Image (spheres, coloured by chain):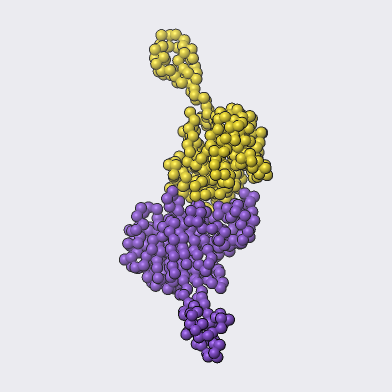
Chain colours: A yellow, B purple
Amino acid sequence: MKITILGCYAATPRSFTNPTAQVLEMGKQLFLIDCGEGTQVQLRRNKIKFSRIKHIFISHLHGDHFYGLVGLVSTFRLLNRENELHIYGPKGIKEIITLQLKLANSWTNFPLVFHELTSKEPEILIDNEHITVSTLPLKHRVYTNGYLFREKEGDRRLIVDEARRLNIDFTLFKSLKKGKDVVSEDGELIPNHLVTEDPPEPLSYAFCSDTVYDPELVPLIANITLLYHESTFLDSEEKLAFPTKHSTAKQAAAIAKAANVQKLLLGHYSTRYDNIELFRTEARTIFENVLLADDGMEIVVE
Amino acid sequence: MKITILGCYAATPRSFTNPTAQVLEMGKQLFLIDCGEGTQVQLRRNKIKFSRIKHIFISHLHGDHFYGLVGLVSTFRLLNRENELHIYGPKGIKEIITLQLKLANSWTNFPLVFHELTSKEPEILIDNEHITVSTLPLKHRVYTNGYLFREKEGDRRLIVDEARRLNIDFTLFKSLKKGKDVVSEDGELIPNHLVTEDPPEPLSYAFCSDTVYDPELVPLIANITLLYHESTFLDSEEKLAFPTKHSTAKQAAAIAKAANVQKLLLGHYSTRYDNIELFRTEARTIFENVLLADDGMEIVVE
């Protein structure tokens, strides 16, 4: 899987930093997560093909997480998009976008499907052959969801040379990949484990922004591969975190540790900090495997 | 007066061009005209102090002219603005902005005053000691206004040395500036013209975007100092101009010539053109004094 950080700074866009937006590539699909002002330009800068985006997930209706959405939808229209576009986000998102399209007298020429969220419990949004996507209810100043993306376990990996050596007809390879034992051309029963290996470990990604420190999140993201958890503040500003319903780097690390995730990716830094390296230093006092998001960064996990 | 071009390209923002937004400085005030996506970042790049903007004029509700407005309003809030902000634009602009603020649960902490426009006749929006601002009804695919900014004639310029030589008491200088004759300390009547000069010629600026070629505009902008007129297309694409209700460079020049303006400023170029110099070449076949807008450009007229 690959995550491209289009923007990972809190609050207001600046000439050198962008508000939240990320592209996740998983199971051959692209998912856009949040869409702050300027996201469409960041997509171009990062050479992401607009037409590959079919699903957009909005965490909450604060401007730094969705003000770029209406512009992106309009640009899809200018690009003569024909494919469906699915937008998941809090109730209200449909009215915001359609009001603006209506007043501009510019309806989309592609199906624009809104999936408005209201539940405070986790919900499965997508469940197909390759992946599931579900919500992660977060606690912020307004109704907010994180999103959890999980690959499904793939087929077993066939050791082709071994299968041939044991004289297994190739029409049985599919059964082997599904974990079945087969009978060779020589009439011998071949136990599956002799000619296959375990499939690659399914990867998983959780996007958690914006949120106050919330241990209730831990069981929902236990043992995942990569956790993006907001860290708006450093511990020195911890007194600001609770009233604004944000987290510190230390709190993000505590969640990562409690959930036993493989890696923690920090972001949503307040623009008051000049040196984001301080976030890593602070988080590492609690959890070792910390990455710092930054605009334009690509994170590949295999 | 000074015009700073924050963006002057049509349709969709790209990594190297911005949609429409300009800042006009006239009569010691700053006016923001249109506010495409990314305008707040362009304001920062061009070092324009956010707090000096008290009036924003939106021409029409196509995204490339206003999608940056809600973000700018939100940033004013984050910057703890206290001064009134006046927004002039088509009916609907208030609902678009307030819906988004409401759903984000983030009302402004400063008075946000909407002046929604519906008239198809020119209207005076601001009339103070220094300037007037009025609408210029334009013909586009949706309800659209250009804006006309006119300085008022200032006081006469006092020739201080001459006034002193003629022994005029300084308490009479104000009367002289207002064009009155005065009596000197020696009891002589001093005709005003002996000690004053004409005030500087009042400047004027018309912003006309987006619009189809429309000769009805000519009397409204006759003899102005500087005309910004959209030129989305070159003459080679003239067949696209009428159906999309845009203009060509040639048509913009024809309006400038008929209105006898001093200078023509072209912009709102379709992103299909790589070389905007072609717009100047084409316009100059009809009207000599042509400037090409480009993002980040400042035009000073004295």
Going 35% across and 64% down the picture, which residue do you hit? B283
- Residue B89 screen position, x and y as percent: 54, 62
Residue A51, quarter of picture: top left
- Please state the total of marks drawn on the protein image: 0
A213 or A87: nearer the viewer: A213
Going 48% across and 80% down the picture, which residue do you hit? B161
Q: In the rendered image of this protein, does residue B142 appear above or below residue A94?
A: below
Which of the image's four quarters has the C terminus of chain B? bottom left
Q: In the rendered image of this protein, does residue B217 appear above or below residue A30?
A: below
Q: Is residue A285 visible?
A: yes
- Residue B21 screen position, x and y as percent: 48, 58
B62 or A261: nearer the viewer: A261
Q: In the rendered image of this protein, does residue B260 appear above or below residue A268?
A: below
- Residue B276 screen position, x and y as percent: 36, 57
Going 43% across and 73% down the picture, which residue do you hit? B222
Instruction: Judge from the rendering whether residue A51 lies leftward or rightward of residue A102; answer left or right.
Output: left
Going 63% across and 36% down the picture, which residue do you hit? A251
Q: Is residue A178 visible?
A: no
- Residue B255 screen position, x and y as percent: 39, 68
